[in-house]
Image: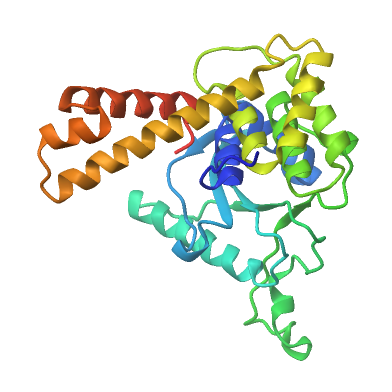
C-alpha cells in the first residue's frame, strides 16, 4: 500500500507530542529523577518555533516546551528532538548545542532585560534501524588529551534510544504509546507485536475535537506499511472491538480518490499558467472555474481535518 505522505514520521511526532499531556507522559518516563521531580508538570506548555538547520528538516523534528520549577525557582525549557534518520549521528551533540544557543538567542531578543539564561534540558528521541552507539557528552568530540581543559564545553543530552526496546517497554500517555509502537513497526522492529499493541490501545481511544487521531494513525500506517501489513492492522483493530475496524481500506480508497482530484487541480493550474481559457479547461477536465475553486477548498479542508495542529 505505502500511500505517499510527505514526512510521515514528522507529521505523526508533531501531531501527538505537540499535546502537552502526551509530551509530559513521555518526558516523565525518560528524564532523570533530579530533573523530573523539580518540574511542575501542570505548567508544561508548548513554545512556538523550530530551531533546526534547514538542511535537516526531513530527518529531524523538534518541539520546545517550558515549565515552572517547584519551589518558585524560575522556569526550565525541555527541548525534545526527534531523530528519525535511520543511522545514529555522532555530530548530534554539536547540532544540539547550536539549537540550544538559538533558543537562548530567541529568548534574549524577546526579553533583553533578563539577568540569567533559562536552563534547557535537551532530549533526543531516536527511532532508527541501528542502536545509538555514540556518547551523549559533547566534550568527547574533542581529542581525549584535551577534554579536561577548562575551555572545552561540558554539555550532555538525554537519550531515548528505542531501537533495543520491545513493545511492552513503551511508556507515556495513550496516544504517545500508540505513536511509538507504530514508529517501532515502521522501522521494522517487532513489527507484528508492535502493530498488535497499537491496535489494542486504539480500541480504547475516544474520539473528540481537534486532531482526528484515528485518521492520523491510519494514514501513518498506510504511509509506512505495505498492503499486507495494513490489512493485518485493520483486522487487529476489529479483533479488539474497535468500532472503526475495517475503515483503513476505506481510508485508502478515499486517499486514492483525493489523489485523483488533486491531479485534476494540478492539471487546471498548469493550464492557467500558460493562459488556457476556461472553456478549453472545462472541456478537457470537466471542471469550470466555480467547481475548480470548490474542489480546492474541499481538499484543503480534508487536509486540515487530517493533520490539524501538525504544522
156 lies above or below 304 = below
Residue at the far front: name it: 283
Q: In this image, 306 relative to 251: left or right?
A: left
Q: Quadrant of the C terminus?
A: top left
Instruction: Find residue 178 and report its image quarter.
Output: top right
Residue pictured at 70% horizontal, 60% vertical: 86
Identify the residue at horizontal 72%, vertical 15% (top origin). 245
Q: Nearer the viewer, residue 131 or 218?
A: 218
Q: Position of residue 59 (x, y in %)?
A: 58, 57
Residue 136: give x, y in percent of width and height.
Answer: 75, 65
In the figure, 255 relative to 51: above or below? above
Quadrant hosting residue 278: top left
Image coords of residue 265 (percent x, y): 30, 36
The structure's colour scheme is rainbow
Q: Position of residue 29 (x, y in %)?
A: 78, 37
In the foreground, 66 or 303 = 303
Task: Evaluate whether residue 308 shows in this view.
Answer: no
Q: Residue at x 65, y 54 (%)?
A: 84
Mark yes or no: residue 220 visible.
yes
Screen quadrant of the N terminus: top right
Number of marks in picture: 0
Amino acid at each position: 500500500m505505502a500511500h505517499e505522505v510527505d514526512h510521515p514520521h514528522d507529521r505523526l511526532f508533531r501531531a501527538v507530542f505537540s499535546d502537552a499531556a502526551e509530551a509530559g507522559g513521555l518526558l516523565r518516563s525518560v528524564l532523570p529523577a533530579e530533573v523530573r521531580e523539580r518540574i511542575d508538570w501542570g505548567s508544561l506548555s508548548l513554545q512556538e518555533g523550530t530551531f533546526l538547520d534547514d538542511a535537516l528538516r526531513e530527518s529531524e523534528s523538534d518541539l520546545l516546551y517550558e515549565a515552572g520549577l517547584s519551589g518558585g525557582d524560575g522556569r526550565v525549557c525541555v527541548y525534545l528532538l526527534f531523530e528519525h534518520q535511520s543511522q545514529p549521528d555522532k555530530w548530534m551533540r554539536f547540532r544540539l548545542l547550536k539549537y540550544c544557543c538559538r533558543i537562548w538567542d530567541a529568548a534574549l531578543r524577546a526579553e533583553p532585560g533578563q539577568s540569567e539564561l533559562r536552563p534547557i534540558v535537551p532530549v533526543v528521541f531516536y527511532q532508527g534501524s541501528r542502536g545509538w552507539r555514540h556518547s551523549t557528552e559533547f566534550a568527547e568530540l574533542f581529542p581525549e588529551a584535551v577534554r579536561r581543559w577548562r575551555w572545552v564545553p561540558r554539555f550532555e543530552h538525554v537519550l531515548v534510544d528505542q531501537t533495543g526496546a520491545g513493545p511492552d517497554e513503551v511508556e507515556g500517555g495513550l496516544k504517545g504509546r500508540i505513536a511509538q509502537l507504530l514508529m517501532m513497526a515502521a522501522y521494522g522492529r517487532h513489527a507484528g507485536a508492535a502493530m498488535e499493541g497499537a491496535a489494542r490501545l486504539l480500541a480504547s481511544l475516544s474520539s473528540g475535537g481537534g486532531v482526528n487521531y484515528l485518521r492520523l494513525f491510519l494514514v501513518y500506517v498506510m504511509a509506512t506499511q505495505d498492503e499486507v501489513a495494513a490489512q493485518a492492522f485493520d483486522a487487529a483493530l476489529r479483533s479488539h472491538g474497535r468500532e472503526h475496524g475495517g475503515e483503513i481500506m476505506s481510508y485508502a480508497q478515499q486517499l486514492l480518490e483525493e489523489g485523483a482530484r488533486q491531479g485534476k487541480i494540478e492539471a487546471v493550474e498548469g493550464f492557467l499558467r500558460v493562459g488556457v481559457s476556461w472553456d478549453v479547461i472545462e472541456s478537457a477536465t470537466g471542471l469550470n472555474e466555480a467547481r475548480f475553486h470548490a474542489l480546492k477548498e474541499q481538499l484543503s479542508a480534508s487536509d486540515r481535518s487530517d493533520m490539524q495542529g501538525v504544522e
